[in-house]
Structure formats: structure tokens, C-alpha cells
Amino acid sequence: MSKKSFSLIEIIFVISIAVIIAMVAIPKLGSSLDKANMVKIKSDVALIRDGLSQYEDKMILSNESTALDSLEDSEDILFDKILQYPIVSSTEQKSLSWSKLSNSSYQVWITSSESLIFNYNKDDFTFDCNFDDNYCEELTQ
């Protein structure tokens, strides 16, 4: 009577293939998460800029003053005057979190150790960062 089972060589072979696949896949997973974070922040910046543009157009069409000193009414909810779905402010230094530094300055965390600061100019309705920073160039294209 013969027993059907795996030999030790077959088990070692399967484990070594699984290890090789994991060694290739795990670094790619990390880089794809970083890219996904950049896309999310880029999307947030585009929405904020679009909201500013829509607000300015609305004020011009209604023949009202276009002045907008602040983009939100509270410190906890950001951009609620220009976005349909505002961003919740965070005090934690984690990726994808936004916080308000001053009445016209905002910080977004790209990773837990890297951040970017955006400034709102109320005179010309711009929302920009320091273009000397490589992340800024990538996020505002």
C-alpha cells in the first residue's frame, strides 16, 4: 500500500519559489503605495484649485466681492467654503493628512516624515507650494 504525500525536496522547492516571488512583489507593493499617495494628494490639490476657481467665477457672475480671506470656518474642517466634501484636519504626522498652519498656509504629509506646505493667496485665488521642491512640481502638474 502506497501513501501519497510530498517529499522533502518538493516542499523545499515550493517554499523557495514562494520566497522568490515575495522578494520581488513586496518592494513593488511599497512603491505602488507611494504612487497612490501622490495621486491622492494631487487629486486633493486639483479639487482645491477647482473649488477656488468656481468660487471666484460665482462671485464675479453675481457681481459680488471676490474676497475670500479664509478657506474654512473652523480649524477642524479644511476648505469647507470651496469644497463640497471638505478635508478633515489632522494633528498627526501620517501620510495623506492635511493640517492648517496659518490662515493661508496648509501642510500635507506625503509620508510620515516628508511634508509639503501650500499657501493660499487671497488676492489672486492661487493655491501653490514652493516650486523648488521636487514633490511640489510633481503634485502641481
Image: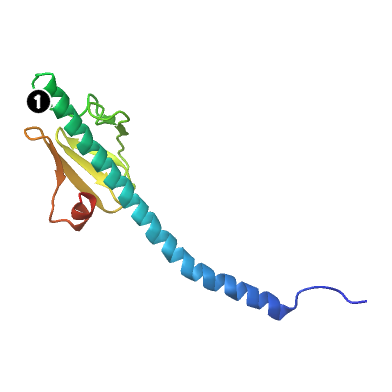
Q: Compared to 132, does 97 lie above or below?
A: above
Q: Residue at x 16, y 24 (%)?
A: 58
Q: Position of residue 127 (x, y in %)?
A: 16, 40
Relative to 40, 52 lies left or right: left
Name, please, the residue furthest toward the bottom: 9
Q: Position of residue 33 (x, y in %)?
A: 39, 55
Question: Furthest-left residue in view?
Answer: 123
Q: Splitting the image into 4 quarters, where does residue 89 fall?
A: top left
| Colouring of the image | rainbow
Give left or right: position of 101 versus 29: left
Q: What number of labels is visible?
A: 1
Residue 131 percent across, percent down from the top left? 13, 53
Q: Which image quarter is the N terminus in?
A: bottom right
- In this rendering, the answer to whether 75 lies above or below 39 is above
Q: Which residue is mark 1?
A: 67
Using the image as rendered, state which of residue 3 and residue 92 is in the foreground: 3
Dot 1 amino acid type: Ala
Give the residue drawn at x 22%, y 32%: 51
Image quarter of residue 54: top left
**Viewer-closest of 126 and 75:** 126
Q: Position of residue 3 (x, y in %)?
A: 86, 74
Q: Residue furthest front?
A: 61
Image-quadrant location for residue 87: top left
Question: What SS does tag 1 mark?
Answer: loop
Q: Residues within 10 Å of mark 1 (few under 14, many from 20)?
A: few
